[in-house]
Image: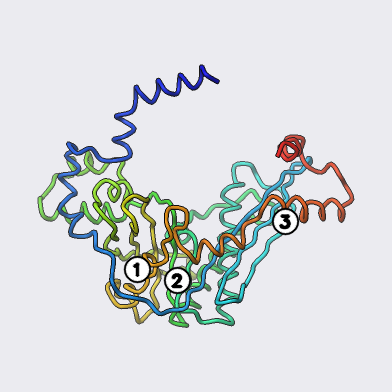
Amino acid sequence: MNETYGDFVSFLRENRERIRDDLIMPESSPRRDLYSDSFRRNFLSPPSDGFNRNISATDSSEFVRELYNGKKIILVRSYTSAGKNIYSSFVPRVMNVGRDDLQRFITMLMEHSEHMSVLRMLEKETPGMVLIDGSISGRINRERRRLVAEGYTEFHNDYVKALAAMIDRANSLGIPLVFIAKSSESRVFKKFLLGEISKGTGMKDQIRTELDSGLNDHYLIKSLATGPGYTRPIQQASTLGDGDAAREYIYHTTHILPDARDLPLKMDFVLPGDEMDSSGSLARSIISMAFWAYGGSKVHNLWLADIDRLVKFRKEEVEDIYMKTFEREIGISFYETRGERRARIRI
């Protein structure tokens, strides 16, 4: 242990400048000079507008256990809160899933469950806005690919239908959908700034490519923001579905920095058809909500934190209830792989 720790310390000391530069843009970097003016014009102070809308929040959770025959026990559930009511979607499966497709499948299954949960809520409720943990851009632009998953090889079709139905239902009710992601590789804001800089300076493509390389939005914000604020919302359009069923959906992307000492939050929002202006009162209300609901580094949004606590599978629940029920109903005691069982016994 001491030997490996010493190697780790040596690695950090040898590479500390490069690692620091990868996390925060150096003061002497030509990139800082390039971006600073445009960034200041498009990084806006927190709005003072209040909001008076009822909030609905959605999140999901998963549990996966491998059996000795290679199949997986998969439990996925989503909750959507609306006032004191909870609308759930639950998917229990015992199935084969290819190892290379497992994470992709579970992610899609959780997101699909969230869409179904929101749709069930919208059958009964009309909240002022719906918060969903995650990103809409990743969902709309998700690569279409056959999954090595028993009974789900064409799951993408059902996934797209439910996502489109959720967006269309919210739009018909005049309800904005708001997606908040805790981490992001987004480069939308960076590209917007580079486009503005190029128009003003006539920057050559080669120089632009060199200065653009490797940067994402959150790196720029952490490097250049001196206080709380948000990036100017940028309108995007993406096509969901294929062939005659393909539809173009418009959404806006911004990044919220509630506290300069914390990390930014990426926020996508879909405005109802008659409220498309990202600088209008509804958009400002959404942005105000994000600042108001920030509860510190451990609580990025009060409503999403509450629903996360409710929906999350916990060790006691899955071991003492779900797995004991599985063992009792199926009648086989040693059903896990040896590795899974050893891991559980150690815990």
Circle on res. 93: 3
Q: Quadrant of the N terminus?
A: top right
Residue 243 in percent (x, y) is at: 48, 66
**Is 347 on the left or on the right of 279, as rendered?**
right
Residue sitting at 38 percent across and 79 percent down? 273
Instruction: Please report the residue visible at 31 percent of the width from the left and 34 percent of the height from the top.
Output: 20
- Residue 127: % across, % down: 49, 79
Q: Foreground: 228 or 193?
A: 228
Q: Which residue is mark 1?
A: 287
Tell me where residue 342 appears, x and y as whole percent: 75, 35
For label 3, count other residues whose C-alpha is less than 10 Å away and answer few (under 14), some (14-19) or many (20+).
some
User: Horizontally, is 302 left or right of 79 in the view?
Assistant: left
User: Farthest left residue?
Assistant: 201
Q: Nearer the viewer, mark 3 or mark 2?
A: 2
What's the amino acid at mark 2?
Leu
Viewer-closest of 215 and 292? 292
For mark 1, does the 10 Å Cα neighbourhood hold few (<14), some (14 to 19), or many (20 or more) residues? many
Dot 3 falls on a residue whose secondary structure is strand
Does label 1 or label 2 sit earlier along the sequence?
A: 2
Is the residue under label 2 in contact with that under label 1 (CB below 8 Å)? no
Q: Do labels 3 and 2 touch, CB within 8 Å?
A: no
